[in-house]
């Protein structure tokens, strides 16, 4: 019987303060539900022993801030000290790090309890989590459907209500897209807002860690904790972190909101468009201005992304060579054979495909022809976005072109996943903050989300609009809950 796990974090906090609840009691409920959700395959490593040990330590302390004693799961490409970190790859199947990511330092300092590492696409490369070495996670709303990806396990864990919080990572939509498919609030912060130290690099110029949660408020509370400058990440911003919760519940009349026209073009299915249009009507009805806006190069975002992400991935994944980290073949005749065979056996198909394409893109003249060119068009796209923010407070768009689809559907088409991400990739390319907010349902009763995109470091304003819409839409998002 879950008495506390389904409460809001503020209610849990009050129960802690009243000494009605202890961290151990809450963990009992978490692991009971995790057991009931095993078929969903969202968790690669449950950290039960470590979690109970931490609960024991916490119970000797005073109750702390709002996240004290609150359980969280972590995408398995975020390094956790003494806890296996696999990136859902055979290459790192038995990798136990001796250090941890800055975000982990921060959540532990806030008193949170890590209860598991979540399933994902191998090295975050994919859109359905089906490239995982551990098999795909399943959507709690209907287990024959994908959770999306690459943060699919994190999404499924929160949507099934195993935990209130997850951390994901977003290089080309991997927080927002699974959040849309599972009915969660998922935030990809401005590039540089959250430290990437200890996030296993996929495409370093695009990667960001962010919160995946049940509600807008809970999302803002977690971003408050993980955001901020980190001297260990050279791309991390020194800009002061605001209290994002201070934006919630503020008036949202007379906002000027733009819709990038390509993001509502015929690439979007009818049912997603209907849900989105309903939101637009609502915003207008409440006195906001909503208009179409042109942003350049959006139709080229996918090929641009492919060039940049694969080039950077091929370079980042060079470190997995059988010598320093992870998997190594047994019979190593000579060093070349050791490298080749280890990488051949350790990586899955999608990862190898990207390393090969990326290496080719960076070879000789190609680097100038493709990588440098893509960088320069990306700058133009960013400038065009920034120009739009001179006239508009925020931009909105659908998050995904359709609702979640059945597992296995895109497996024989390596391009399908990229095309599904056509609406989410632009924010990564421009380094902008973007979030998913649940906005409605498909005919099959699967969640459909929408995106709110902000100017750099305008996460507060995004939460303001999101909290207003969350209240107005008042959706029942418990459809994935177990027990
Ligand atoms: N689906 C995209 C890809 O496969 C994005 C993945 C991500 O954001 N990690 O590259």
Image: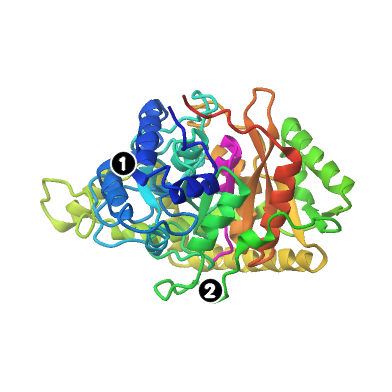
Q: Is residue 259 visible in the rendered structure shown here?
A: yes
Residue picked out by circle 2: 237
From the top left corner, tell me how far across and down residue 338 is, in percent: 18, 52
Vertical relation: 193 (above or below) 108:
below
In which image quadrant can residue 99 be found?
A: bottom left
- Image quadrant in which the N terminus is located: top left
Q: Nearer the viewer, residue 460 or 339?
A: 460
Which of 255 and 93 lies nearest the eye of the viewer?
A: 255
Q: Is residue 188 magenta?
A: yes
Residue 289, given in percent of the width and then of the height, sits at 87, 54
In magenta, the rendered stretch is 174-191
As helix, strand or loop, the secondary structure at mark 2 comes to loop
Q: Residue at x 53, y 45 (%)?
A: 11
Determine whether the beta carbon of the residue marked 2 sits less than 8 angstroms from the nearest atom of ligand 1.
no
Do the numbered discs 1 and 2 sit on residues whose CB atoms are within 8 Å? no
Count neighbours of disc 1 (C-alpha within 10 A) and say few if under 14, some if 14 to 19, many if 20 or more: some
Mark 1 vs mark 2, CA separation in Å: 32 Å
Pointer 1 or 2: first along the chain: 1
From the top left corner, tell me how far across and down residue 363 is, in percent: 43, 63
Instruction: Look at mark 1 in the image and give the residue it sits on.
Output: 45
Task: Name the residue located 86 percent from the left edge and 53 percent from the top edge.
Answer: 288
- Name the residue: 60% across, 42% down: 419
Figure check: 66 above or below 268: below
Is 262 part of what is drawn in magenta? no
Q: Circle 1 — which element? A: strand
**x and y percentages locating residue 444 in the rendered image:** 65, 22
Left or right, 329 with reference to 202: left
Which residue is nearer to you in this view: 409 or 81?
81
């Amino acid at each position: 019987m879950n008495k506390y796990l389904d409460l809001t974090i503020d209610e849990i906090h009050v129960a802690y303060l009243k000494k009605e609840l202890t961290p151990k009691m809450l963990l009992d409920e978490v692991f009971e539900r995790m057991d009931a959700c095993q078929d969903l395959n969202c968790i690669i490593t449950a950290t039960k022993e470590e979690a109970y040990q931490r609960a024991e330590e916490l119970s000797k302390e005073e109750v702390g801030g709002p996240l004290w004693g609150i359980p969280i799961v972590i995408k398995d490409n975020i390094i956790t000290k003494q806890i296996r970190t696999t990136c859902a790859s055979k290459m790192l199947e038995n990798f136990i790090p001796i250090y941890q990511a800055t975000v982990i330092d921060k959540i532990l300092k806030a008193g949170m309890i890590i209860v598991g590492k979540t399933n994902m696409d191998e090295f975050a490369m994919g859109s359905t989590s089906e490239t995982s070495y551990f098999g795909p996670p399943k959507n709690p709303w209907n287990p024959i459907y994908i959770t999306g990806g690459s943060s699919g396990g994190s999404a499924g864990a929160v949507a099934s209500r195993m935990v209130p919080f997850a951390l994901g990572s977003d290089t080309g939509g991997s927080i927002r897209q699974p959040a849309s498919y599972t009915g969660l609030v998922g935030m990809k912060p401005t590039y540089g807002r959250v430290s990437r130290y200890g996030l296993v690099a996929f495409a370093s110029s695009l990667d960001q860690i962010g919160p995946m949660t049940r509600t807008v408020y809970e999302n803002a509370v977690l971003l408050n904790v993980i955001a901020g400058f980190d001297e260990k990440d050279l791309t991390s911003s020194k800009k002061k972190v605001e209290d994002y919760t201070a934006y919630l519940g503020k008036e949202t009349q007379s906002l000027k909101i733009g819709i990038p026209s390509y993001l509502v073009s015929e690439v979007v299915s009818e049912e997603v468009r209907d849900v989105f249009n309903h939101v637009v009507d609502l915003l207008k009805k409440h006195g906001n201005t909503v208009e179409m806006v042109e942003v350049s190069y959006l139709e080229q975002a996918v090929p641009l992304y492919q060039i940049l992400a694969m080039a950077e991935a091929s370079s980042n994944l060079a470190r997995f060579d059988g010598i320093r980290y992870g998997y190594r073949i047994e019979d190593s005749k000579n060093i070349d054979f050791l490298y080749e065979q280890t990488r051949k056996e350790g990586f899955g198909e999608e990862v190898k495909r990207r390393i090969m394409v990326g290496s080719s893109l960076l070879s000789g003249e190609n680097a100038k022809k493709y990588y440098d060119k893509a960088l320069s068009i990306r700058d133009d796209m960013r400038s065009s976005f920034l120009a739009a923010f001179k006239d508009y407070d925020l931009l909105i768009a659908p998050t995904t072109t359709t609702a979640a689809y059945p597992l296995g559907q895109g497996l024989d088409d390596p391009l399908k996943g990229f095309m599904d991400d056509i609406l989410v990739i632009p924010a990564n390319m421009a380094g902008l903050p973007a979030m998913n907010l649940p906005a409605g349902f498909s005919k099959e009763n699967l969640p459909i989300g929408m995106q709110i995109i902000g100017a750099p470091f305008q996460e507060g304003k995004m939460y303001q609009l999101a909290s207003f819409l969350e209240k107005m839409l008042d959706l029942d998002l418990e459809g994935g809950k177990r027990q």
